[in-house]
Image (tube, rainbow, N blue to C red):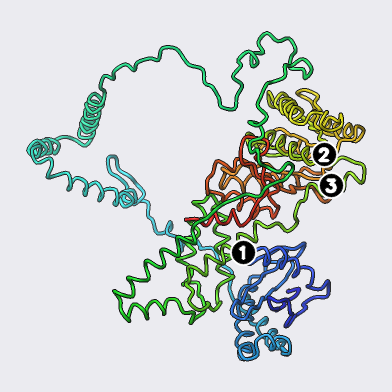
């Protein structure tokens, strides 16, 4: 039984509504559908789940209408798709003239008495689902096995079964074809083959098989001996030269810890000499500012040149026929159909996959664009390709723009007013750059005047604590206490290796509260999304300490793997959390963005699958290589040919 069926315009005006059962109104689920699907360009799937309801919808792009039906998700109603199609067609045909003649005024002033028609269509749909008889299993007499006799199942020695001969028919034809091609080149060996064939007729089948095997092995042994040729001994290099890194320290004695008895303590370790300008990168930057991603695209200028160059010769060659053909292809005289868009959408899908968008996400995006444009009347002097491309660009920009903007600085200042530290937890798989980008975010917070406590909760990876200790030393060298009124701006809280990460994070937050730190950055161990024990430990850390922001750190190099990582991380956090409303990922840090050129599809995949914003983008190796996401720049790079 249906809970409701509603018809409304894309402007938000409800034209007609049917309430099937007594209960809550359709307002909340329909509003959720509008916010999460229609406004976010996620119409690839015509089904949406909201709490205990399943909503199915259909768009009418010609008259800007939306048809939505809702029912309990525990029910399996096979007639819903047919019902929504029939209602859509009946409603359009009944009020077509009113929509075309009056337009928006027809929606405002019109009265839509559609109850009797809807009830008739509902009864027809329910009856059609009952008419279909359930599929009955075949009896043994109806099966092919009952037609086989015992004689046909007996196999004699040396005789191949008939079924296998049929299956290998194609292979045999291929071999015959190759032998026919190779016959002219082997004309000299024809007599030998004929004589050998005459001998084989006198031999038994087993002897023929044995001879064929011997010839096969003899041929391959000869081919192997010919391929083996003595290779000249490669000249060995005399000695090995040490590699000198551009950003490294040229003094080898500073890097030699072999005779040190300090065991890595922060007080006794020598202070590294490094160039601050090298660590900061851009000298002309504005301190504390988080710049947007930049991408310059010359596609528009190139397209204009191509259009100008291609349009001139077409008029000369084609004459009036070419001109009328061009106008016929450009003038919007009909509404878009799925057949018109399919070739363009197929190319767009391949283009998105080539740009590192996950294949599943690319298919859903193209499906969403098709549903958005199907039935829409094209504008004057526009092509199908340009219309589809424009709609896809708008959809991508809408996906990258978050529903809720994460403003870290504002939230930190709000936490300061409540006299508590603002806690950010970093999680992700191995090797994506969690510790490095944590140091970049620390530097950005320090330049904005906030003190930072780094909690070393990666108690598993060798060298993880020492890496954070080095970053802490360098950050304190760039921002010494003397420049901040004697206040230490960044400090490391660590308890060594093999300890409970959740307990260390809890102690670090308590220490930051007592010492007056503004922000606590919790570094966690890298873990694969399939490792259940480590995912349980991460869920415990987040559930116990309740951080203000949970950031998933993912690299821009991944494609389909990004979807798998985010889905399983969120699922693990939900499954292993003890809370009634589990804490999931709040935002994304996209790293290694400087290594992918224009293959920026991972940004689309991550935001589409989670509906969470990309808060920070890592673009290099220095502390200043941190950016905020610019949706238009990413889409421009994505749509570049």
Helix, strand or loop at mark 2: loop
Mark 2–mark 3 Cα distance, whole angstroms, equals: 31 Å
Mark 3–mark 1 Cα distance, whole angstroms, equals: 30 Å
Q: Which mark is residue 45?
A: 1
Q: Looking at the picture, how far across and down is residue 32, in whole percent?
A: 75, 65
Which residue in the structure is indicated by mark 2?
Answer: 450
Please indicate, yes or no, whether residue 459 appears anywhere in the rendered image.
no
Q: Quadrant of residue 74?
A: bottom right
Residue at figure coordinates x 69%, y 20% from the top left = 272
Looking at this view, is 266 or 53 the one in front? 266
Which residue in the structure is indicated by mark 3?
Answer: 579
Looking at this view, is 304 or 377 the one in front? 304
Q: Could you tell which of marks 3 and 1 lies nearer the N-terminus? A: 1
Looking at this view, is 450 or 76 the one in front? 450
Task: Classify 90 as above or below 408.
Answer: below
Helix, strand or loop at mark 1: loop
């Amino acid at each position: 039984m249906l809970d409701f069926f509603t018809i409304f315009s894309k402007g938000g005006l409800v034209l007609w509504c049917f309430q099937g059962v007594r209960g809550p109104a359709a307002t909340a689920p329909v509003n959720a559908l509008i916010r999460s699907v229609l406004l976010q360009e996620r119409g690839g799937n015509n089904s949406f789940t909201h709490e205990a309801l399943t909503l199915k919808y259909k768009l009418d792009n010609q008259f800007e209408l939306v048809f939505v039906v809702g029912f309990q998700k525990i029910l399996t109603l096979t007639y819903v798709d047919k019902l929504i199609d029939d209602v859509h067609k009946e409603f359009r045909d009944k009020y077509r003239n009113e929509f075309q003649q009056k337009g928006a005024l027809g929606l405002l002033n019109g009265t839509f008495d559609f109850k009797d028609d809807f009830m008739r269509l509902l009864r027809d749909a329910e009856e059609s689902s009952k008419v279909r008889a359930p599929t009955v299993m075949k009896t043994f007499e109806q099966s092919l096995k009952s037609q086989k006799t015992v004689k046909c199942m007996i196999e004699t020695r040396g005789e191949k079964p008939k079924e296998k001969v049929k299956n290998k028919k194609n292979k045999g034809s291929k071999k015959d074809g190759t032998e026919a091609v190779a016959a002219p080149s082997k004309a000299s060996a024809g007599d030998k083959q004929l004589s050998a064939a005459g001998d084989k007729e006198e031999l038994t089948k087993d002897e023929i098989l044995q001879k064929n095997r011997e010839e096969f092995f003899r041929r391959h042994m000869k081919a192997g001996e010919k391929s083996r040729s003595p290779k000249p001994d490669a000249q060995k290099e005399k000695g090995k030269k040490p590699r000198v890194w551009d950003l490294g320290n040229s003094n080898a004695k500073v890097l030699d810890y072999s005779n040190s008895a300090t065991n890595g303590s922060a007080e006794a370790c020598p202070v590294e000499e490094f160039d601050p300008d090298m660590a900061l990168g851009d000298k002309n930057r504005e301190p504390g500012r988080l710049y947007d991603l930049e991408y310059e695209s010359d596609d528009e200028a190139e397209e204009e040149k191509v259009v100008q160059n291609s349009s001139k010769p077409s008029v000369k060659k084609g004459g009036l026929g070419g001109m009328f053909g061009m106008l016929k292809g450009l003038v919007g005289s009909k509404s878009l159909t799925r057949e018109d868009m399919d070739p363009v959408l197929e190319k767009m899908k391949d283009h998105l996959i080539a740009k590192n968008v996950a294949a599943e996400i690319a298919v859903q995006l193209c499906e969403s664009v098709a549903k958005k444009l199907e039935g829409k009347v094209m504008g004057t002097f526009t092509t199908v390709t340009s219309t589809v491309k424009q709609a896809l660009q708008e959809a991508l920009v809408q996906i990258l723009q978050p529903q809720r903007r994460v403003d870290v600085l504002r939230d930190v200042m709000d936490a300061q007013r409540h006299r508590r530290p603002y806690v950010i937890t970093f999680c992700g798989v191995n090797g994506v750059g969690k510790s490095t980008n944590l140091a970049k975010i620390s530097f950005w917070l320090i330049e904005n005047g906030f003190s930072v406590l780094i909690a070393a909760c990666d108690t598993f990876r060798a060298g993880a604590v020492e890496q954070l200790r080095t970053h802490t030393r360098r950050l304190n060298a760039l921002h010494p206490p003397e420049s901040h009124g004697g206040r230490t701006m960044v400090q490391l809280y660590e308890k060594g290796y093999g300890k409970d990460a959740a307990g260390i994070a809890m102690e670090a937050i308590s220490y930051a509260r007592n010492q007056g730190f503004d922000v606590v950055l919790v570094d966690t161990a890298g873990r694969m999304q399939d490792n259940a024990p480590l995912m349980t430990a991460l869920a415990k850390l987040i559930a116990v300490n309740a951080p203000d922001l949970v950031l998933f750190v993912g690299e821009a190099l991944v494609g389909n793997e990004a979807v798998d990582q985010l889905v399983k991380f969120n699922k693990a956090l939900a499954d292993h959390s003890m809370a009634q409303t589990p804490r999931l990922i709040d935002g994304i840090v996209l790293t290694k963005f400087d290594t992918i050129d224009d293959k920026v599809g991972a940004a689309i995949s991550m935001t589409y699958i989670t509906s969470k914003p990309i808060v920070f983008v890592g673009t290099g190796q220095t502390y200043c290589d941190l950016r905020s996401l610019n949706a238009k720049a990413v889409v421009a790079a994505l749509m570049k040919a």
